[in-house]
Amino acid sequence: MPATLRNLLLSPNIFSFSFTFLLSINSLFFSCCFSIDEQGQALLTWKNGLNSSTDVLRSWNPSDPSPCNWFGVHCNPNGEIVQISLRSVDLQGPLPSNFQSLNSLKSLILPSANLTGTIPKEFGEYRELALIDLSGNSITGEIPEEICRLSKLQSLSLNTNFLEGEIPSNIGNLSSLVYLTLYDNQLSGEIPKSIGELTKLEVFRAGGNQNLKGELPWEIGNCTNLVMIGLAETSISGSLPLSIGMLKRIQTIAIYTALLSGPIPQEIGNCSELQNLYLYQNSISGPIPRGIGELAKLRSLLLWQNSFVGTIPSEIGACSELTVIDLSENLLSGSIPGSFGNLLKLRELQLSVNQLSGFIPSEITNCTALNHLEVDNNDISGEIPVLIGNLKSLTLLFAWQNKLTGSIPESLSNCENLQALDLSYNHLSGSIPKQIFGLKNLTKVLLLSNELSGFIPPDIGNCTNLYRFRLNDNRLAGTIPSEIGNLKSLNFLDMSNNHIIGGIPPSISGCQNLEFLDLHSNGLISSVPDTLPISLQLVDVSDNMLTGPLTPYIGSLVELTKLNLGKNRFSGTIPAEILSCSKLQLLDLGNNGFSGEIPKELGQLPALEISLNLSCNQLTGEIQASSLALASWGSLISLITSSLGI
C-alpha cells in the first residue's frame, strides 16, 4: 500500500470528513424528494389517516415545495393556507387535529365528505378560523367547549351529523358568530342563555334534535340581528318569550312540531320584517294576537294543529303580502273575516277542523290567486258564494262537513283549474250543474250525503281525468249515463243510496281502472252485465231489483275481495266460475232466488274470512267446512241455515 494512502486512511480527520459528506448527501436527497413545507406536512399527515379509496387527493404530492396548488387548498399571496375546501368528496376518516401550523387558516369546508369520529378539541387552537362547515357527515360525540375559543368564527355549520350532548354553555364566547346551524343531530339539554351574547347572530337553526328541550330563553331577544330561528321537531316547550318582539330584523320563526304552549305574545307584532311564522303542531293556546295584522311583510302564517280559541282577527286582512294561511285543527270560532278579501296574493286558505260559523264571505272571491280553499269540518252555513267562479286559479275546494244550503253554483265551471271538489255532508239541494263536468282537470268530485236531486248529467263523460266520484246518500234519480264509460281513469265510483233506476250500463267496461263500485240501495233492474272491469276489487249492488242468473263472467274478476249481491232478485244457480275469485274475503248472495246445489268448493276460497251469506235462497247441498277460512263456523251456519231448510 502506498504510504500516502496509508497515511490518509490512518488520519483521524478521515472519519470527520466521511460523516460530513454523508450528511450532505442525505440532506440533498431529502431536500430533492421531500421538500414540502410544514403546512403541507400537516395536510399529508391528515391524509395518511384517511381511508379514502378515491384519487381525489392525488394532487397532494409530498415532492411539491408548497401545497398551494393542491386540490381543495387555497393560499394567500404569502403562500399561507387560508382555506381548505373539500365538498362532497369521499374522505372516509377523522377530522384533522394537527392543523396548528396552519396559522392563517380561515375556512375549513368539509361538508358531505364521509367524515367520522369526533370533533377534536384541538379545533379550539385554530384561532384564525372564521368559517367551519362539517355538515352532512357522520360525526359523533359532543361539541367540544374548546371550539368556543374561536373569537373570529363567523359561521359554524355542524348540521346533519350524529352529534350528542348539549350545546356548549359558553357558546356566547363566539362573539363574531353570524351563522349557526346544528339541526338534524341528536343534541339534548336546553338552549344556553349565553346565546343572547351572540349579538351578531343572524341565523340559528337547531331543529331536528328531538331531545333539545326547555324554553326558548328570554335572552334570545338580545340577538337583535337574527333573521331566522329554526327549532322545528324538537322538545322546546313553554311560551314564546315576550322578548321575541325585540327581534326587529327577524324574517322566519320556525318552531313547528314542538311542545310550545301558552299564548303567542302580542309583541310579535313588533317583528316588522317577519315573513314566515311557522308554529304549527304545538299546544299553543289563547287567541291569535291581533298584532299579527301589523306584520306588513308576512307571507306565510302556519298555525295549524294547536289549541287557539276565539275568533280569527280581522286585522290579518291588512297583511297584504300573505300567500298562505293555515289555521286548521284549532278551536277557533266566529266567522271567516270578510277582510280576507283584501289578500290579493293569497294562494292557500286552510281553516278546516275548527268551530267556525257564519257564511263563506263573498269577499273571498276577490282573492283571484287562490288555489286552495279548505273550510271543511266547521259549522258554516248559508250558500256557496255565487261568484266562486272568479277564483280561476282554484285547484282544490273542500267545504265538506258543514251546514251549507242552497245549490251548487254553476259558476264553478269557470274554475278551469279545479282538480278536487268536496262538498259532502252538507244540506245542498237542487241538481248537479252539468257545467262543472266541463272541467277537464277534475280528478275528485265528492258530493255525498247531501239533498241533491235530479239526474246525473251525461256530461260526466267529459271528465276524462276523474279518479274518484261519490254521489252516495242523496236523492238522485234517473239512470246511470252510458257516458260513464269514457272515464278511463276512474278508480272509485259510489252512487249508493239514491233513487237511480235502469240497468248498469255495459259501457262501464270502459272504466279500465275501476276498483270500487258501490251502487247499493237504488232501484236498479235488469242483470249484471258481462262487461264489468276486471280491475274491480269491491262490488256492492245489494238492495236493488236486479234479476236474471249470475253471469259466469263473474269468475273473470280475479281481483275481487268483496262481492255483495244481497237483497235482489237473482235466480238460477251459483256459477262454479266464482271459485276463480280466490281473493274473496266477503261474499253475500243472501235474500235472492238462487237455487240448485251450493258449489262444494265454495268453502275452499282461501281468503274468505269476513262473511259468507247464502241465506234466504232455495239452495241445497253442503259446504266443505273443513277448509273454510272463516274464523267462526258457527256464525256461518247461522247465515246459511235458512237456505237449506234446517
Image (cartoon, rainbow, N blue to C red):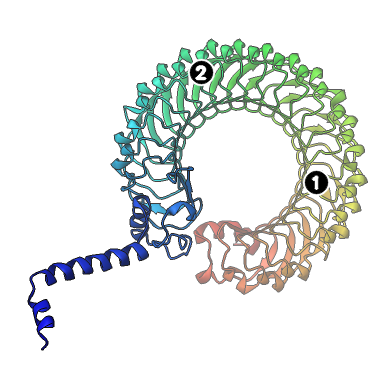
Residue that lies at the very extreme toward the bottom in this rendered image: 1
Residue in view at x 76 percent, y 58 percent: 513
* Amino acid residing under circle 2: Ser
| Element assignment for label 1 | loop
Q: Is residue 11 depicted above or below 175 in this figure?
A: below
| Residue at mark 1 | 522
Q: Is residue 13 visible?
A: yes
Tell me if label 1 and label 2 are in contact, CB under 8 Å. Answer: no
Which mark identifies residue 285? 2
- Disc 1 to disc 2, C-alpha distance: 48 Å
* Amino acid residing under circle 1: Asn
Residue that lies at the very extreme toward the front in this rendered image: 3
Q: Is residue 62 depicted above or below 468 in this figure?
A: below
User: Where does the image place residue 423, in percent across and percent down from the top left?
Assistant: 76, 33
Quarter of the picture containing the N terminus is bottom left
Quarter of the picture containing the C terminus is bottom right
Q: Is residue 162 depicted above or below 60 in this figure?
A: above
First in residue order: circle 1 vs circle 2: 2
Q: Is residue 99 left or right of residue 336?
A: left
Q: Is residue 277 left or right of residue 217?
A: right
Q: Of 389 and 407, which appears nearest the observer?
A: 389
Q: Is residue 423 depicted above or below 471 in this figure?
A: above
User: Where does the image place residue 119, in percent across and percent down from the top left?
Assistant: 34, 44
Q: Mark 1, residues whose alpha carbon is within 10 Å: few (<14), some, or many (≥20)? A: many
